[in-house]
Every structure is written in C-alpha cells, then in structure tokens.
Image (spheres, rainbow, N blue to C red):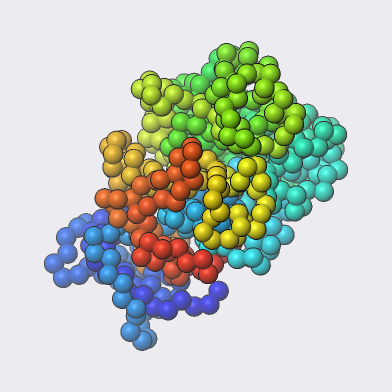
C-alpha cells in the first residue's frame, strides 16, 4: 500500500471508547496511521486516558509526523470515531462493501460463514480491489461439503452462499450428517490449514446442518483452544420451546466453551435466540461471570434473511412450531409466501433463493423489546449480517457487483446498508436506548477486542489513538440515519467522511468509486 499524504483533521468531536476521550481535538494522519491528537486552545472535553502500545498519550505527536504541510480538513460540528468493524458480513463484493462504507464501516469481515480456501479468496479480492478492509473465517460448512461430499467449492460461492451451494446439490448429503472419525479428522485438518493461511477462526453454520453431530463440534473446540483461534457459530437450534429450542442450542455452545476453553462467538443473537431471549442472555451473563469465553452480536432489525431452503424454514418445521408461512417474503418474486404448500413449491424450484423472515413483530412492544434487550446487553457488538445484493433473483451481474451507482431495483435486506447508522440514529438518538458513546463502542472497540487475541492487527483498530490505523468514520450526529427499507435498498445518510488506512473512501458525503484502499485482515496462529 502506498503511503498516504499527511492530513490534519480539525475541530471534530473525537470519541475514543477505550480511553474515554470525548472532546474537540485535531487529529493528524500520516502514512496510514494516526500520528498526533492535539487539543485546540480552549477546547473542552475529557482528556485521553491512554495511548496505543509504544505511542505517546492522547495529545502527543508520534514519530512519523512532520515533513510538508498537511492537507487540512475542517470537521467542525462532526463526530470523529474509530472506523466501524463489522464481524458478520456476507456482502463481500465491491458494491456490497461500498454500501457498507456509506454505513460507516471501514472493516467488513465474513466470520459466521467465511471462505474456503481463504488464501485464494483473499488473493482474488486483493486483485479486484476493495473499498474497505475485508477478511474471512475458514468455512466449516464448505470444508464438510468438500471433504465429505467431494465437491470442489472454490469460486462457487463468490456470488452466492455456502448454504445455497450445498442446497443446490441434491446428491451431496454428507455435509448434513455426522461424519465418521476419519472424515472429522479431514474436516478439522482442512479448517486448521485455512486458519494458518490467515483465516480469522472458523465460521460454523451449525444451524444449517443441525444433524451434523456433537463429537465434531467438541473436537473443533478443542483444536481452537489449542491453537488460539475463535469459533463463530450460527447456533444449532432457535425455537422458543423444546425440543430443539434456542436454550438447547445455546447451552451446547456454552458447554463446549467451558469444557475446552475455546472462544465461542454467538452470531446474530437477536434472530437465532429471539424465541427465548431472556433465558439465553441470563445464561450467557452467568457463563461470562464464571470466565467462559462466549461473546455476542446483534443487528437492529425485526426481520432476518437467509436462503429459503434453510432447514429451519422447512414447512413441516414451521407448521410444528405454529409459525405462519406468511412470515416469509421470497425475494425472487417479492411475494409474501401465502401457505406452507407454496413455500414447499418455492424451495423445490429455487433452493438457492433468498428470503426475508419476520422473527419479531415491530408493532408489539413485548416482541420488539426482545431485540432491544439483545442490543443493550453488556458486551454485545453490532454486526450487520449484510447480504449480497440481487435484482429479481440475479446476484452476479457486472452492474450489481461493481457498477456504481447501483442499478434500479437492486435489493438486499436493509441491514446490508444501514445496520450501524440505524444504531446511531434510531436506537441511540431517536429511542434513547443507549448513549452515542455506547453505540460507537459497540461498533468499534467491542468487535476489535473480540478479535484481537487471534488477530494482532485489531489492536490498532477500533480506537482513535496515536499509533493506531487511520480507519476513521466521521459523521453528523444530528442527521446520521439508515434509509434502506424492506421495500427499497437505499444508502445511509450522515456519514460525511470515511478514511481507510488514511485514504478517503467517502469525502463530503460522496463515495469515490475509484477509491479501493481496503486491505486484507488476517489472523496469526
């Protein structure tokens, strides 16, 4: 990466969650790093209480500062925060990440699912270029599909999901069921190989293969604890009541984390565990208090999105649970699914099709209150679960992948364009469920700390401190808001500037389509 020109960002309200800094500061950026943070004469605010390792304090000037006069950018009236870090995004295309940049994201990681092989996926992304930083977990489901069903998975999920690929191959059945010991060994070895190649832990789509058995999960957790990498899990079950309840799925994961010492991250707690959210969060809190390494994430929407062929959308399962098919919207046609029979027809005709599912009632205070409890639960990170865009079921057209602006009719779940700005604008400013500082912390420092044990680069992200990466999100706190809906995908508003490694991806509210400063983020095991 070429060295960025020196910048002087003046007059912003700088918020650094780790040190407690919240005040008017000037921030100098050089060579992709923050080299100075200084208080203007007469500025109010709390002084920084710390600094990056080996760097000066909040007002110190780093060794790299100096040289020619920097470019000065006046940020009066705006908030300068660490760049937002998304732990859970499947929107790993150029345009998918452009929409996330407009949502304030500077690092977007696909950790629930991930990629396989990781090194080749990173190389492909680097060759094409990305507007923001990116990275991948090693994909457990793809490793199973490859090792147990003999499927060549590389390059087959770039525009689609691992689940959609697996479901589109009716002859592939091994990925769904328990493997023999020799098969488990091959799967685990393949995952370890990809973690050692830079994969950020293992992404485990357990909820899409709930019959895959428990032995493999325990052995994977043992290996994760031994090598020091995290596991990011879509829990096995999510129903409100027994059998196959959210509580059963959650306790399984707490159990393997407690017995092995592995770090287990619970993906989208708001949707997977909404049927028993109070029991689940109470259990998580108790486990964390006892030192169990379990962490949480959520996104601020009442509906989820996934492949319509997902196991938990089976018509017989929904009927058994008393869940109406009308909770599901099929994105191939935009229709609300009218009946269980119609759902079965769609699943047979388009197993890779995408759907949006109402898992909560936004007009029922008790129902939507479950979402708010997840979002305000101590230590929960905001994470989008962003999806690849499509137009009438097509995902791989050139204009969808790279053309800018987006083509008319492009659609994805609104979380793909508005997760973080919705947290700032709706959850914090409009509803008052948390302070602005807390919303920023859950978007920056919390995800960085979840990862930094296995990903040393994260110790320089999620913070505004001397020596840290100049991944910065600068926004108007009075106007920042999401604009995407379940009818229309629209970019967020209020992100005025976005710097990735000291380079502008967004300036004065306008995204630069030519800016591709994103770099790969890798684990070190």
In the rendered view, does 510 fall on the left or right side of 242?
Answer: left
Q: Quadrant of residue 130?
A: bottom right
Residue positioned 35% across, 83% down in the render: 66
Q: Quadrant of the C terminus?
A: bottom right
In the rendered view, does 221 fall on the left or right side of 406?
Answer: right
For the residue pair 387 and 403, the one nearer the viewer reads as: 403
Q: Is residue 382 above or below residue 329?
A: below
Q: Is residue 256 above or below residue 404?
A: above
Q: Is residue 85 above or below residue 51?
A: above
Residue lying at the far bottom in this picture: please name it: 68
Residue positioned 34% across, 38% down in the render: 427
Q: Position of residue 167 (x, y in %)?
A: 75, 35
Q: Position of residue 316 (x, y in %)?
A: 68, 16
Please indicate, yes or no, whether residue 484 appears anywhere in the rendered image: yes
For the residue pair 380 and 115, the one nearer the viewer reads as: 115
Q: Position of residue 238 (x, y in %)?
A: 57, 24
Please indicate, yes or no, whether residue 524 appears anywhere in the rendered image: no
Residue positioned 82% across, 48% down in the render: 152
Q: Position of residue 313 (x, y in %)?
A: 64, 25
Q: Quadrant of residue 470?
A: bottom left
For the residue pair 521 and 70, the one nearer the viewer reads as: 70
Q: Quadrant of residue 248?
A: top right
Residue positioned 74% across, 31% down in the render: 349
């Amino acid at each position: 990466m070429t060295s960025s020109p020196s910048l002087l960002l003046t007059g912003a309200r700088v918020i650094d969650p780790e040190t407690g800094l919240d005040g008017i500061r000037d921030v100098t950026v050089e060579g992709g790093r923050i080299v100075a943070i200084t208080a203007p004469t007469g500025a109010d605010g709390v002084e920084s209480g710390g600094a990056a390792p080996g760097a000066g304090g909040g007002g110190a000037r780093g060794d790299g500062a100096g040289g020619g006069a920097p470019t000065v950018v006046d940020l009066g009236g705006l908030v300068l925060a660490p760049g937002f870090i998304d732990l859970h995004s499947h929107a790993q295309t150029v345009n998918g990440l452009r929409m996330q940049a407009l949502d304030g994201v500077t690092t977007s990681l696909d950790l629930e699912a991930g990629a396989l092989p990781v090194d080749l996926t990173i190389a492909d992304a680097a060759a094409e270029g990305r507007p923001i930083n990116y990275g991948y977990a090693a994909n457990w489901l793809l490793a199973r599909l490859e090792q147990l069903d003999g499927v060549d998975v590389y390059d087959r999920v770039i525009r689609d999901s691992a689940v959609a690929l697996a479901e589109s191959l009716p002859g592939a059945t091994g990925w769904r069921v328990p493997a023999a010991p020799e098969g488990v060994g091959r799967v685990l070895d393949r995952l370890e190989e990809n973690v050692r190649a830079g994969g950020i832990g293992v992404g485990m789509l357990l909820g899409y293969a709930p019959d895959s058995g428990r032995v493999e999960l325990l052995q994977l957790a043992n290996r994760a604890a031994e090598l020091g990498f995290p596991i990011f899990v879509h829990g096995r079950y999510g129903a409100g009541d027994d059998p196959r309840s959210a509580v059963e799925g959650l306790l399984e994961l707490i159990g393997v984390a407690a017995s092995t010492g592995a770090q287990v991250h619970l993906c989208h707690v708001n949707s997977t565990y909404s049927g028993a959210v109070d029991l689940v969060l109470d259990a998580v809190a108790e486990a964390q208090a006892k030192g169990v390494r379990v962490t949480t994430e959520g996104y601020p929407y009442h509906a989820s999105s996934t492949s319509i062929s997902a196991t938990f959308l089976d018509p017989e399962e929904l009927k058994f649970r008393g869940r109406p098919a009308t909770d599901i919207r099929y994105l191939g046609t935009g229709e609300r699914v009218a009946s269980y029979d119609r759902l079965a027809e769609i699943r047979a005709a388009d197993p890779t099709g995408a759907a949006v599912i109402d898992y909560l009632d936004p007009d029922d205070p008790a129902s939507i209150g479950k979402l708010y409890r997840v979002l305000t639960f101590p230590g929960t990170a905001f994470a989008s679960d962003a999806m690849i865009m499509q137009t009438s079921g097509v995902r791989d057209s050139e204009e969808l992948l790279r053309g800018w602006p987006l083509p008319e009719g492009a659609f994805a779940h609104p979380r793909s364009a508005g997760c973080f700005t919705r947290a700032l604008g709706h959850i914090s400013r409009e509803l008052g469920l948390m302070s602005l500082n807390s919303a920023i912390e859950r978007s920056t420092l919390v995800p960085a700390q979840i990862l930094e044990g296995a990903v040393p680069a994260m110790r320089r992200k999620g913070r505004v401190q001397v020596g840290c990466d100049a991944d910065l999100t600068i926004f108007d706190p009075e106007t920042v808001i999401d604009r995407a809906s379940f009818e229309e995908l629209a970019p967020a508003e209020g992100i005025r500037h976005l710097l990735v490694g000291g380079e502008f991806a967004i300036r004065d509210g306008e995204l630069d389509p030519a800016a591709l400063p994103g770099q790969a983020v890798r684990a070190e095991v």
